[in-house]
Amino acid sequence: MGTITGVAAVRTEVDDMSYTVGIPREVRRVVSLVPSLTDAVAATAPELLIGATTWCTHPPGLEVERLRGTKNPNVRRIVELAPDLVVLNKEENRKLDHERLVAAGIPVWVTVVEDVDTALRSLERLFALALGVPEPDWLVTARRELGGAPPEPVARAVICVWRDPWMVVGRDNFTTDLLRRLGVENIFAGHEGRYPHMSLDEIRAANPDLVVLPDEPYEFGPDDGPEEFGAAARLVNGRSLTWYGPSLTDARQVLSRQLWPIEERCR
């Protein structure tokens, strides 16, 4: 569905938040304020990207203008760049910045990701409706790798995302669902908070089979985290665990190797 505004052809689409967005018929200039989506667009239509946050670390060597962070983007500079579309995420970005960009006349597409299925659908809609580009092969592969019903759990886990204070993954999280598809049950999936604070005693009292320690947002490492949990500790790749872009294609393989080292798989 399209209208004509001045001399520019504009089509109207509905984003994941059910906001109606007026988008140029041909999108040529995109700003992404979400690391996962920057990675996704760069792997699919790199010529479109003109700006991203300082946290957008993938793909390595991405040469676009940096526009501060996900929670404090340089809105004034984004407006000056006059992108055809700015891509946001409900969880990672602020409603205030969305409102400021819209008020300045910038088309904004908001994604909503709550689990693996919504991530796959959101990416499909982003490419087909917002950007108008063909579905990438990596998304087809991700759907094949992670789609379908999850298996019965074989392990119970606590997933830590910060320390001092300790924070864990709670309810309604992409990470919880991704691990569920690998046979790992998040012990705190039923918690009322999405990222609740937990003491070490509370984490240990949950008696987890695994304590998952990703290298982002907190950079857990061999000497920072595992010493608290002994044999249950598992250092994992944070991008494979929490990003919903091209890393989905091999997330199962990467995380399986890290959660169950070969010596355990051979027992």
Image: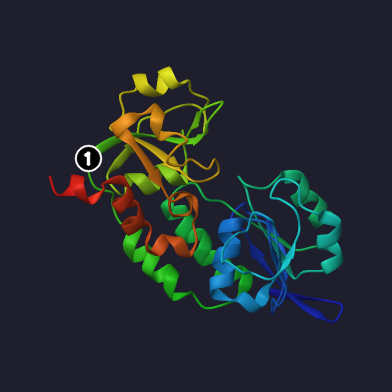
Of helix, strand and loop, which one carries label 1?
Answer: loop
User: Residue, x 76% and y 58% (percent of image)?
Assistant: 67
Vertical position of residue 108 compared to residue 174: above or below:
below
User: Residue, x 12% and y 44% (percent of image)?
Assistant: 267
Q: Position of residue 71 (x, y in %)?
A: 71, 45
User: Which residue sits furthest bottom?
Assistant: 7
The amino acid beneath tag 1 is Val
Q: Callout 1: few (<14), some (14-19), or many (20+) C-alpha neighbours within 10 Å?
A: few
Locate residue 73 relative to residue 38 in the image: left or right.
right
In front of the other: 27 or 48: 48
In front of the other: 18 or 226: 226
Vertical position of residue 211 compared to residue 243: above or below:
above
Q: Position of residue 107 (x, y in %)?
A: 75, 63
User: Residue, x 26% and y 46% (percent of image)?
Assistant: 260
Q: Position of residue 142 (x, y in %)?
A: 39, 64
Q: Position of residue 45 (x, y in %)?
A: 59, 76
Name the image colouring: rainbow
Task: Determine if residue 32 is in view.
Answer: yes
Which residue does the numbered mark 1 point to in the structure image? Answer: 154
User: Which residue sits furthest front?
Assistant: 223
Q: How many marks?
A: 1
Task: Determine if residue 104 is in view.
Answer: no
User: Residue, x 36% and y 22% (percent of image)?
Assistant: 204
Q: Quadrant of the N terminus?
A: bottom right
Vertical position of residue 37 compared to residue 186: above or below:
below
